Image (cartoon, rainbow, N blue to C red):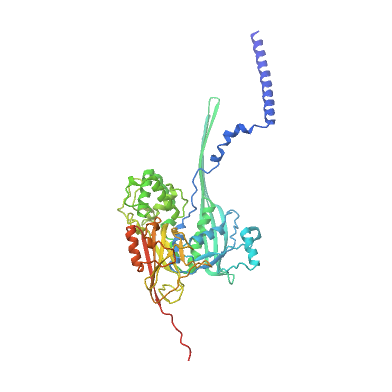
Amino acid sequence: MYKTKQKLSVSVYKTFSRRFLVLTSALFLISCSTPMDVRKDAAFQSYANLNGRPSVRPVRSMSSFSDSLDCMDKMLRDAEVPSTLVTSKQIPDFSTRAPVATKDMIITALLQMSRTSNTFRYVDYEVDIVRQDTVQNLTNILLNNNQIQLQRPSLYFSGSIAFLDQNVLINRYQAGVSQTRFDGGYSQNRNASIIGLELHLGDFRTRTLIPGLDSANEVILGTGGQGLDLAGRISDYGLQFNVGRDYAQGTGTAIRTLVELAVIELTGKWARVPYWQCLTLEQTHPSFQRQLRDWYDEGDAAIHRNLIQSSLISKGYLDKKSSDNQISDSNFRRALGKFQADHGMVVNGVIDFKTYERVLRDYVSLDAKGNLVSYGWAPSKATQINVSAQPPSSGKLFGNSEEMRTIDLQIENILMGRSKFEVGEQIFLSATVSRSSYLYCYLSNSSGSVMRLLPNAISPRAVLAAGQTLRMPDWMSPNPGYVIDAAAPGKEGLLCIATDNDVYAKLDDDLQVAGLTPIPNVDGLPDLLQRYSNKLNGDFTHAAIYWDVVPKKTVKPAQ
């Protein structure tokens, strides 16, 4: 009797389970056919705005040759290479495995090495109808109506991503063990691929490639990974565990490295400058940033703050008279943001690895064996900078803040090293500051009369970014607003004064005159400099340049 009741109850339970499953399925189908009330998801959806944003701050795209491009800019400026119009063909990818904007990388590299030298100006004209945009369409309309004129380039880039040989080297390793209730395995793999870029420089006028101006470079891309698998059983239950680590070096950064290297080589050969000096910097070492990252990870936030703060003081971004306890977080972030802006970084005022790397890269060099070593500080052992070892070619770590800012004044007329002009001859000048500053420039004639050249009504802003060249007058503009002519025989000059803040309101009333007008009660540039020093207590940087004006030569009529 007991067994019969037990079988009956089991049968009833199974029947009830089937009916419950059918009923649940029916209710689920009915609920799916009914529209959901989206208002009930409002609280859940409110997190979308935040969760949809990136969780890591953006950084500026910089390669191993970013400093080499800056070096080329200074080298081309010192060589006084004239401005040259350049264009480029499309750079195809014949490997079909590296779909990157190679042409745009060439443009970026050319512009970065022309910030102060103005050596290369890119002619942006697109003939492919598919790639034409609004600006191109307007250009075509104005060209057809003779309202715009395009200058013919002198040079053009040609080339391609020639090949991408994948998995040239492959290394695999696998091992495992197995028992009745346990299985385990370990795997590791590594492989290497090679990507090649070929660029050439051509003469646009004859549409011929210039012999010797070619570049063919390769770079190796690596991928790798390792994994561990574990599986076992405990009684009637099974357990599985899997963990792995992988890395892959992308083609985008590899192509950018090859492009910048090729552009430096080709333009250096074309301009006949010692471009190799810009390719032997420590920053071009393949392990440079990885080594800095190791040092960055070794230190804590206090060490990073102390290192960067001391470097900012030495570079003039922070007051050298302030002690560590007197520099507030707001002042530190403001100074750090200014440094980031001057060095082409994303400005956030935060100590991250990119900022650490840009601030302290001058204190890294190569030892006799070619290994990267740090000079001037020990990240893992000290909390203060050790100044006993001086970094090579970078100056002392601590110094006068105003000595760390420089003003580069140049006479930009065509002839190199020119310092003598005839009366009535036009003069072209330029100024560049090493860090963002308020810049005031004054022009003096042979009689000692002084007028403020900049700022003026045409160029009212006195702020000049680091590395930006200010042209006086702007010969790149068809309407510069003013010209500088040699007035009378004697010595003329230009004085530029750079400050961290706008000091115009602190000057004497007679110095606060409109631009491009003579200043009363000032006798020459030395007198003006002394008055600035009296008001600002020497808290500024200045530079001056002079040239001689001679009478205009008269041509005797032929007898």
**Rendering coords of residue 465 (x, y %):** 45, 58
Q: Is residue 26 left or right of residue 508?
A: right
> Does 36 sit above or below residue 144?
above
Displayed quadrant of residue 35? top right
**Rendering coords of residue 413 (x, y %):** 45, 72
**Rendering coords of residue 174 (x, y %):** 52, 41
Point out the image quarter for the N terminus. Answer: top right
Displayed quadrant of residue 343? bottom left
- The answer to whether residue 112 is seen in the rendering is yes
Q: What is the residue that sits farthest to the bottom in this orientation?
A: 559
**Rendering coords of residue 272 (x, y %):** 47, 69
Residue 365 or residue 411, whichever sits in front: 411
Residue 408 or residue 367, whichever sits in front: 408
Q: What is the residue that sits farthest to the top in this orientation?
A: 1
Q: Which residue is depicted at the point 33% across and 60% down?
A: 533
- The answer to whether residue 383 is seen in the rendering is no
Q: Is residue 546 left or right of residue 135?
A: left
> Does 290 sit above or below residue 235?
below
Residue 357 or residue 336, whichever sits in front: 336
The total number of labels drawn is: 0
Residue 132 or residue 366, whichever sits in front: 132
